[in-house]
Amino acid sequence: MATKPWMRQAQQKLRAERDSLPLPRSMTTSSDVVELHTEERVQFIDLTELVAEHVRRSGVGHGLVCVQTRHTTTGVVVNENEPLLIEDAKRMLERLAPRDARYRHHEMHRRRDAAADETPNGDAHCRALLLGTSETLAVAGGALQLGQWQRVFLVELDGPRPRTVAVVVMGIPR
């Protein structure tokens, strides 16, 4: 199949732009694990300033930062830190995965790996599937790049508990 003329032109333009870019300096990375303790069963914890500080201290001028939860009953999301919206989000999660629904995950006698002290939390696992475990965000000019209302949240779905979040910044040094 022949390449369309407009596609060839776009490819040539991309090659020209790529070839004119200066070679990148060495890459740098910075990683950390943040430990915190949540206070409610379902809670939105604003991590934005913490992540922005990790980016500032990393020495990365342009690159990416990844924020990842290390638990299967939490999520990481970007949204607005507005109390009524957060209440709406909590209600939405309850509608989509009600706490009092019947979950096979609660059938401890059928599970080979269930801990003796495990509590029923099938709703939290299902909610986490809807949210995702990480967000990768742009870093430019040595700063986290977010829109005016955007904030980075750890969403607790089975608290209160101790939690850990990994923050990895990588890119070209300042």
Image: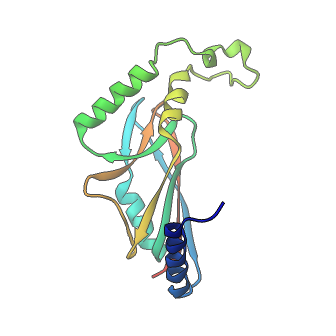
The picture places residue 160, in percent across and down from the top left corner, at 45, 33
Whether residue 26 sits left or right of residue 83 in the image: it is right
Is residue 61 at all visible to an observer of this figure? Answer: yes
Name the residue rendered at 36%, 64% in the picture. 145
Q: Position of residue 108 (x, y in %)?
A: 67, 16
Q: Residue sitting at 71 percent across and 12 percent down?
A: 109
Residue 9 lies, in percent from the top left, at: 50, 74
Number of on-image labels: 0
From the viewer's side, name the closer residue of 10 and 48. Answer: 10
State the residue in front, 135 or 124: 135
Q: Is residue 121 visible?
A: no
Up the image or down, 18 lies above or below 71; here it is: below
Q: In the picture shown, does residue 112 fall above or below 62?
A: above
Question: In this rendering, is residue 139 above or below 94?
Answer: below
Question: Please, which residue is most extreme toward the right here?
Answer: 112
**Residue 22: % across, % down:** 52, 88
Residue 140 placement: quadrant: bottom left
Q: How is the image coloured?
A: rainbow
Q: Quick check: 43 left or right of 17?
A: left
Which residue lies at the image location 39% right of the left edge and 20% below the top edge?
A: 95
Quadrant location, the N terminus: bottom right
Which corner quadrant holds the C terminus? bottom left
Image point (37%, 40%), residue name? 44
Residue 103 sits above or below residue 27 on the image: above
Q: Quadrant of residue 146?
A: bottom left
